[in-house]
Every structure is written in C-alpha cells, then in structure tokens.
C-alpha cells in the first residue's frame, strides 16, 4: 500500500462526507451505492489445501535454548516425542516470507480484563486475540479470507479430517493423534466430550461466545467412537454449515483433566465455584494454543511463553511458534491503536473511526513503525430491539410495553425514518469511510446484494406520522410521546439502550441516537456497561434496545449462521425463548428462520446466494434491526513482522488475530527487538508461580 494513497486519503478527510443524502421520502428505498473505498491490499486467493497438511517429517527442530536448558537437562522429552505422529505442517508456499527464525515477541494491547481461564464456563480473558491464541478449536475459519469462494470450507485444526455418511445425517471426525496439552497431558476425545456433555449441553453452564446445542442444529448429538474419533448425528442431511461453528468461539475444547474435577457433576462445587476455579492469577493453565500464560499483573500485562508441546511445525520440521513470547498489555481499545501506530504495541484492529485520521497520518510518514491497510466494509452498528413479548429476561410493566412497541412495525419504521445516518457517520469521521447501513448483511460481504437491501431514508415528519400510527401521542405536551392510558401508567416512552462502555464509537453513536430520538419524541437513556456485562445482559434478555457492533455472521454469513435469525430458542442476539423454552416469533421472523434453515442444509452455492438475497429483503423490509452505519477496518501491524498474509481483513470469518496465523509470524534476527520479559524460559507446572528456566 503506497504512502501516496494514505496521504491522498488523509487529505480527503477535510470534510467530504461520503454519505449520500437519502431521498427525502418515507418509501422503502434501495440503499445508496456505498462510496467507493477500494481495500488497500489485494488478497492472493488460494485453494484451502495450499495452506496446511498433516504429515510426519524426517526430523524436527526447536529453539536451541530449549534443547540446551530443558531437553539436555531431562526437563523435557526430545521435541520429536512432544509432537503428534503427524503434526500439522504449514506449507511454505502459503507463507509470504517463507520459513522463519525463532525469537522476539508479539505485543498486543487489549481493552478487556481477564475474569479467569474457564472459557468453557463463560469467562473471558480480555479479548483482543488472547482467547483466540489460547484455545484451539476443532476447525479453523479465520484464514479462509484467502480461500477461493468455490473451494470454501472450514480448515482442519484439532479435527484433522471428517467424512459424511451416505445419508448425510452422520459426520465422523478424526482428531489429531498424539497431540498434547501444554502440560504434556494427552489431547483426546475425552476433552471434546467433556466440553459437549458438561458445558454446551449442561443448562447451568453458558460457554463464552454462547455455544448451545442449536449452534450445531436442533437435536444434534455427538459421541466419542474412540480416543481420536468423534461422531456427530444431525436431524437434517448434510448440514455442512455447522462445521464452521466447530471453529473459534463455539467449539474450542478445554483440558478435561483440569476442568472435570471442578465441575459440579464430579465434585461438591457449585456452578459458580466451577466457573471461578481458575482465577487470572492461576499461571501455566494448560492450553493447546501456541503460547501459555506465565505472568499476570492486574491492570498491567499478561505475558505468555511458547508452548513446548505445540502440535504445529513448518515444512523444515521447525516446531512453531517462531515467536517465543506474547504480551497482552491491559489498557483500552483506543490505546491499542495509538500504541500500534507509535510502535510501543505491535498489532491493532483499527475499528473506531474516531482514530482513523491520526492513525492514517502517522502511518503515512516514512519513519512510521507500523503498516496500516484498510479492508472491506465489514463493521456495522445496529439498534437491536428486544422482540420477546413472552417473558425472556423477566421484563417489568414498562419493559414489557417497550417490547410490544418493538414488535409494532409502525414503531420500527418511525425509529428508522428518524435516524439521520449521514449525521451519525459525520460524527464519527468525515471522508470516504462511513456508509449508510440498513442492517443485515454488510456491504463488504461476498453474499451482499444491494438490490435486496432496502431502508426508509431519513424523514422526521414521516417518522412522526408512523409514531402516531403506532398509537403514541405526546399527551402531556413535554415533547416526549406517552404510552396509551392504561399502559405503563400512560408515562413518557423512555427506552433504555444497552451500549458497551469500552468503545468510544459505541458511546458516540449512542449519544447520536439519543439526540435524534429526542427530536422524534422518544426518550432514550444510555445503559453503558463494560463489554462483559453488556454481553451478559444481551444473552440474558435484560435490555429494551441494544446498540450492537456486528458479529461474524453479518460479515461472512457462513460463520455462526444460526445466529442470523431465531432458528432456535437461544440463537438470535435479540429474541430468545422464555424459561418455558417458548419463542413468540412474528411472521417475518419465522420467514427469516426458515430461510436460514434452508441455507444451512443447502450445498448449492447459487441457491445459497439466492436464499441470502431473500433473507436480506425480508430483514430490511421489516426493519429487523435499525441499521446505522458501516465502515471498513484497518489492520495495523509493526513492520518488523514477516509472514503477514496480504490483505488480511480485521474481520471476516473471524478477527485478524486468527486470520493472520500468528504462530507463523517471525522477525528476522537482525530486526528482533529486546522486548522479551522471560527470555529462554518455558511455562512451569499448572498453578505454579510462572515460567521456569
Ligand atoms: C478483536 C476482538 C478479538 C467480542 C471483542 C469485544 C468483546 C465482544 C468482540 C476486536 C475485541 C476487539 O472485540 O474489539 O478488535 O481484537 O476483541 O476477540 O468487543 O466485548 O464480546 O464479541 O470480539
């Protein structure tokens, strides 16, 4: 990407807002063509098989200090005995800068904070790539951004191969054989079954990222055939989409030898004690990931050291990762951008438009320490309205009255028509970045079809008419409409909107929505919470509206597909079943769910594309959410790193921390920084006090 482009873009920031004025009409209109914003780097598309394979190699290598200080001292078995029979081998042809060298550190900065290591019981570790690096999954999808559309299918990972039965109702998966947790214990189907039986299926446990049985299809079952073979059974034939959900977030099994003894089914622990059994201070927690947590300084940093049992190598037999250490500096998301651009951090997903200008200007300078490259428009914000009217989240009278309004199409039309998307976009950043977003599939998605994407352009007078049609009038003349007499005491319509406190963008858009709804005659109050609490409120139905950044399913469609609609009791972000497992779907929601269920069992790409067009039309015509704005993100990464795949988007099938395959990154010896805090050390015993020499 040339500096010239950056300078030109920076100049363009003067004020040419690219948001086209929507027609001032209250009719349903095709969204405007998003302003041309060419992603700055080109992806070299490959076959999935070009990335990796599983095979035994004639010899294996490790950093020389591991041999000298650990193997020769009999503290570790030789590397060939620490690897599976057939380790995963990354192919050199897919490595932009080829086989690497050992050493150096990858310094992340994150805005979250670790709750503990029990990811499977719902604890988060602070996001920003920390969980993506620790907890490996059956399949992998992040790197699929570089795979040709006609060859798209999840990459093997802990599951090295799979085969469908003739009738398509059974899927037999072979696990990698002989891989070990970072403490040397075997990884087997016991780990997989403990995750499925005692975390996904146990109603008292809510795994992080919300995996439930329906994530893999209603009625789906799973069993172990032997130590390294599992078998899925599905109600529908050939539901290939579900293999995507066996990737990051929803099927990344934990170490049963650590977790099972703490689970209430096998101990006297409560579920709360199980969830909190491994606090952030518990070091060397066994993982399948490339690096292991060895040091935790609250509100300061988490340090990780290479996993001596990591089960992946390069074609020369060098055990990965090349980087000996990773840091997760505990700061804010905004600071992540600042540090990456300044060079005190190494990587960031530039996803808050408020930081675009400064980041672009700094990166355009010749001595800039980091590269910055924008990808497609795959980040958007929606107002999600709680559509449940039968008790999800135990609403009080006011909250129930709001839900009834949310289910009223005149009310939803009023809200979307009163939304001035150009004004919201300009409040974030001026220039060619931000575009009108109607909700639904994002314009950077391979499945996007603009003609199927409709919205009601900004029209405040039209909005007020719709509000009246919804039965709302300002009976006390204070500028805010009232509930009808007998509903919620005939009081002002006041709506609590859940937003994340961790992002400037979420709060900026929240303030913008408040101001615009005030003009319509609706009082919106921000309920700003830390993301982890916001997520819990979202999952628990404890909200009227939620201002929510888009997730994988609206970017790639094939990732977390069931979350595109209320296809099951707990799949939608804003309409889940009550505690009697009843889902009170509106007719258009049923159509959305039926369309997605057809997509999941289709194996014809043309039919799938058609189904998503239908989905998009039903979604946007009925204002399933109030889309606000969408924009591209940019990957910022320090220039000293090699093997960064060209054109990696910050978000498509997963975040960039997955897509760039961090275990393959390396720094040429001459360019290595002196950032390691525990040089030549390895993780110690689980629960021990940190790394060991
Ligand atoms: C990326 C990501 C990696 C979660 C999180 C955070 C949580 C949500 C979302 C993003 C952060 C970064 O996003 O913003 O750039 O590094 O971590 O996991 O927003 O609060 O619950 O869905 O991914």
Image: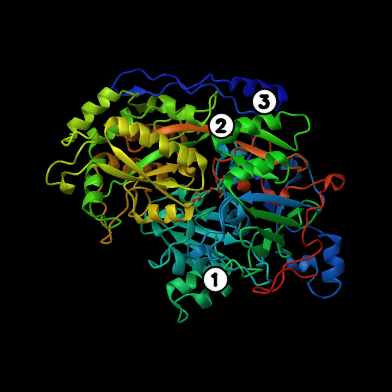
Lateral position of residue 255 relative to residue 96, left or right:
left
- Residue position marked by numbered label 3 in the rendering: 6
Helix, strand, or loop for circle 2? Answer: strand
Q: Position of residue 325 (x, y in %)?
A: 74, 57
In this image, 266 relative to 286: left or right?
Answer: left
User: Distance between the Cα atoms at labels 1 and 3?
Assistant: 51 Å
Q: Nearer the viewer, mark 1 or mark 3?
A: 3
Label annotation for residue 9: none
Residue 264 x %, y %: 44, 76
Picture quarter with the N terminus:
top right
Q: Residue furthest bottom?
A: 268
* Element type at mark 3: helix
Q: Earlier in the sequence, mark 2 or mark 1?
A: 1
Write down the residue under mark 1.
Answer: 190
Which of 609 and 210 lies nearest the eye of the viewer? Answer: 210
Residue 578 versus residue 544: which sits nearer the camera?
A: 544
- How many other residues sit within 10 Å of disc 2, few (<14), some (14-19) or many (≥20)? many
Q: Nearer the viewer, mark 2 or mark 1?
A: 2
Per the image, label 1 sits on a secondary structure element best described as: helix
Labels 2, 3: front one: 3
> Relative to the observer, which residue lies in front, 219 or 99?
99
* Of the image marks 2 and 3, the number of the one nearer the N terminus: 3
Q: Which residue is mark 2?
A: 376
**Mark 2 and mark 1: span between their CA atoms?**
40 Å
Evaluate if marks 2 and 1 touch, with contact meaning CB atoms under 8 Å apart: no
Cβ of disc 3 within 8 Å of ligand 1? no
* Number of callouts: 3
Q: Is residue 216 visible?
A: no
Q: Residue at x 35, y 31 (%)?
A: 516
Residue drawn at x 50%, y 39% is: 505
């Amino acid at each position: 990407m040339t500096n010239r482009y950056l300078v030109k873009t920076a100049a363009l920031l003067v004020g040419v807002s690219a948001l086209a004025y929507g027609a001032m009409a209250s009719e349903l209109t095709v969204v405007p063509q998003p302003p041309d914003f060419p992603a700055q780097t080109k992806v070299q598309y490959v076959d999935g098989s070009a990335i990796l394979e599983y095979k035994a190699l004639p010899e294996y290598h490790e950093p020389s200090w591991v041999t000298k200080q650990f193997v020769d001292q009999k503290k570790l078995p030789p590397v060939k005995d620490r690897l599976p029979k057939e380790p995963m081998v990354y192919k050199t042809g897919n490595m932009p800068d080829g086989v690497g060298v050992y050493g150096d550190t990858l310094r992340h900065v994150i805005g979250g904070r670790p709750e503990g290591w029990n990811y499977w019981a719902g604890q988060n570790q602070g996001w920003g790539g920390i969980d993506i690096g620790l907890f490996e999954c059956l399949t992998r999808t992040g790197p699929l951004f570089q795979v040709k559309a006609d060859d798209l299918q999840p990459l093997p990972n802990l599951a090295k191969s799979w085969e469908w039965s003739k009738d398509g109702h059974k899927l037999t998966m072979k696990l990698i054989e002989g891989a070990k947790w970072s403490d040397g214990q075997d990884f087997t189907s016991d780990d997989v079954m403990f995750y499925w039986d005692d975390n996904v299926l146990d109603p008292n446990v809510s795994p992080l990222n919300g995996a439930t049985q329906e994530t893999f299809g209603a009625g789906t079952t799973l069993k172990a055939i032997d130590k390294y073979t599992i078998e899925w059974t599905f109600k529908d034939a050939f539901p290939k989409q579900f293999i995507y959900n066996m990737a990051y977030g929803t099927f990344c099994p934990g170490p049963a030898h650590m977790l099972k003894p703490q689970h209430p089914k096998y101990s006297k622990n409560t579920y709360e004690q199980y969830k909190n059994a491994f606090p952030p201070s518990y070091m060397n927690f066994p993982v399948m990931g490339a690096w292991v947590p060895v040091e935790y300084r609250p509100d300061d940093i988490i340090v990780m050291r290479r996993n001596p049992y990591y089960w992946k190598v390069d074609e020369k037999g060098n055990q990965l990762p090349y980087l000996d250490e990773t840091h997760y500096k505990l700061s804010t998301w905004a600071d992540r951008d600042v540090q990456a651009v300044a060079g005190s951090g190494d990587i960031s997903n530039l996803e808050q438009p408020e930081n675009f200008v400064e980041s672009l200007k700094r990166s355009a300078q010749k001595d800039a320490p980091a590269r910055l490259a924008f990808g497609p428009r795959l980040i958007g914000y929606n107002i999600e309205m709680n559509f449940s009217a039968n008790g999800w989240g135990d609403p009080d009278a006011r909250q129930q009255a709001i839900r009834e309004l949310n289910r009223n199409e005149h009310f939803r039309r009023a809200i979307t028509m009163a939304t001035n998307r150009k004004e919201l976009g300009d409040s974030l950043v001026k220039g060619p970045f931000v575009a009108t977003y109607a909700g639904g599939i994002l314009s950077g998605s391979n499945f996007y079809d603009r003609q199927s994407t409709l919205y009601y352009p900004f029209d405040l007078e039209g909005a007020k008419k719709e509000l009246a049609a919804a039965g709302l009038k300002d009976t006390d003349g204070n500028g805010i409409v009232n509930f009808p007499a007998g509903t919620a005491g005939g009081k002002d319509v006041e709506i609590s909107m859940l937003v994340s406190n961790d992002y400037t963008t979420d709060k900026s858009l929240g303030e913008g929505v408040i101001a615009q709804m005030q003009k319509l005659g609706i009082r919106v109050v921000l309920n700003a919470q830390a993301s982890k609490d916001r997520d819990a409120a979202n999952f628990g139905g404890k909200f009227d509206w939620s201002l929510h950044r888009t997730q994988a399913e609206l970017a790639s469609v094939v990732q977390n597909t069931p979350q595109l609609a209320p296809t099951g009791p707990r799949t939608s972000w804003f309409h889940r079943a009550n505690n009697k497992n009843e889902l009170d779907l509106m007719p258009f929601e049923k159509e959305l769910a039926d369309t997605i269920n057809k997509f999941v069992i289709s194996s014809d790409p043309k039919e799938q594309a058609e189904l998503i067009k239908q989905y998009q039309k039903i979604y946007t015509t009925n204002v399933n959410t109030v889309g606000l704005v969408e924009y591209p993100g940019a990957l910022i990464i320090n220039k000293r790193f090699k093997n960064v795949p060209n054109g990696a988007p910050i978000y498509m099938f997963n975040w960039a921390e997955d897509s760039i395959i961090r275990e393959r990154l390396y720094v040429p010896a001459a360019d290595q920084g002196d950032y390691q805090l525990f040089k030549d050390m390895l993780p110690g015993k689980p629960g021990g006090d940190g790394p060991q020499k």
